[in-house]
Amino acid sequence: MKSVLTIMVLAGISAGVFALGSLRKESTGKALLHIAEEVALTVDVAKPQRGEIIHLVQAPGDVEAVLEVDVSSEIVAKIEEMPVQEGDTVKQGDLLCRLDDRFLRADVESGNARIAQLEAAMVQSNADLDKAVRDLARQVKLSENDATSDVELRDYQTKRDKARAVHEMRRQELIQAQAALKRIHENLARTIIRSPIDGVISRLRAKQGEVVVTGTMNNPGTVIMTISDLSQMQVRTRVDEVDVPLVRAGQTARVYLQSDQDNPVPARILRVAAKGSKPTGRDVVTFETILTVLSNEERIKPGMTANVEIEVARKTDVITVPVEAVVHRMRKELPESVVEAFDKSQAGIDMSARARQAQYIKVVYVMDDDVAHVRVIEPGIADTRRVELLSGVELGDTVIVGPYRSLDQLKDGTKVALAEDKKDKKKTPTNADDEAKVAVRFSP
């Protein structure tokens, strides 16, 4: 009996508490009895700002000379003389090295002898042809008087044809020998290697006394040295496939050398590759992009590594917020009124129902009377710190920017609060300096 009475008393108390909790004040609408008051999330906030924003695309690259020539040998020979060293400045036509030409000079003598021999053979074959022509003419006259047979006449015709063929063969052999001698003279001229351009010897790969070889299908051959024209430099960079649609020829850029990252070098986009490439062992597709360096400073040297910032867009006098303020929420996590407003703005985009359900919407949370309210935004361009907002917030709003754990838990209508030190400085500025400090606290 006592247990039944205890149960009835507890039930009555629970019903009374529930009834009091459902009653609200007429003036404020708040409950008369707070059974479990909501704990406010501590957040960081910032004010939207109006100003300039620049969208940059970053990529790694390598510095190289616009005009760079690898000097190789066109013949197989030993380097007899090399009057230059790495780092020397050379002009077009200056002697770079001299190759051993003894064997080629011997080939020239042999070629001259061969030509003289064939010229003598030409004289002999010409004489034999003249004799065969005279003998045939005599036999023709004899055959007209029936003084010779037809067989004999045809034999003399055959001798005339053979002499003519031998004469033509000797002539062709002479042409062949003359061409061979011309090729030997050209190879002899190749033993003297001169600079094809004005520049600096940026790399010396062979030494005096080494034998250089020509390239074949499977052997690239010997590169004696590399000459670079340092008057005009460029950067060969690799832009990610996500950013490459924004990059165009003529855009300005800044090159940050690894050796001096505090002083960027101005540059301009020269061209962007039409086809991407995938580095070995990676799944990322990149597009080779060439930038012309707009400076002739001596600190810029071929082979240096650099980071490139390409300016793809610039806007002035726009509303911006810190990038941390923009978060992604699934449709089902947002109020229906917010989703309906977003769908109206996306009326021209055709998406399946399943895709819409899985769609993420970009929003920001605005703090108003210690309550977070969600706002659907239309972002514009962004840099590493701030993002342009085309719609969704105004300059007077207070945007929640962190911390991350609080942003992750935020929902429309969530109670929020600033940290105590931030709240005090926000509410009690005593002079102009204090007001300036409040503005700093609200900055990103």
Image: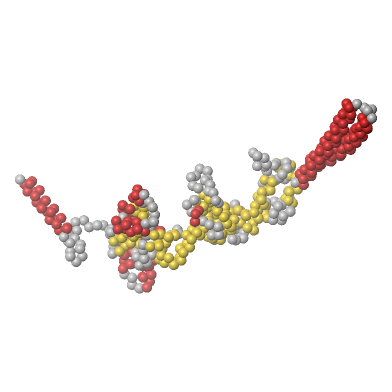
How many numbered badges does the structure rendering display? 0
Locate residue 59, reporting x and y percent: 51, 53
Answer above or below: position of 125 versus 230: above
Residue 255 visible? The answer is no
**Location of the C terminus (image quadrant):** bottom left
Q: Residue at x 68, y 48 (%)?
A: 71
Determine if residue 435 is in view: yes
| Colour basis | secondary structure
Left or right side of 308 for 168: right
Residue at (52, 45) in percent of width and height:
279
Residue at 77 percent across and 43 percent down: it is 183
Q: Nearer the viewer, residue 282 or 350?
A: 350
Quadrant of the snapshot with the N terminus: top left
For this rendering, which residue is in front, 237 or 33? Answer: 237
Please provide percent x and percent y for residue 104.
Answer: 79, 41
Residue 213: image x %, image y %?
A: 70, 41
Q: Residue at x 71, y 56 (%)?
A: 91
Quadrant hosting residue 77: top right
Where's residue 15, x and y in %? 13, 54
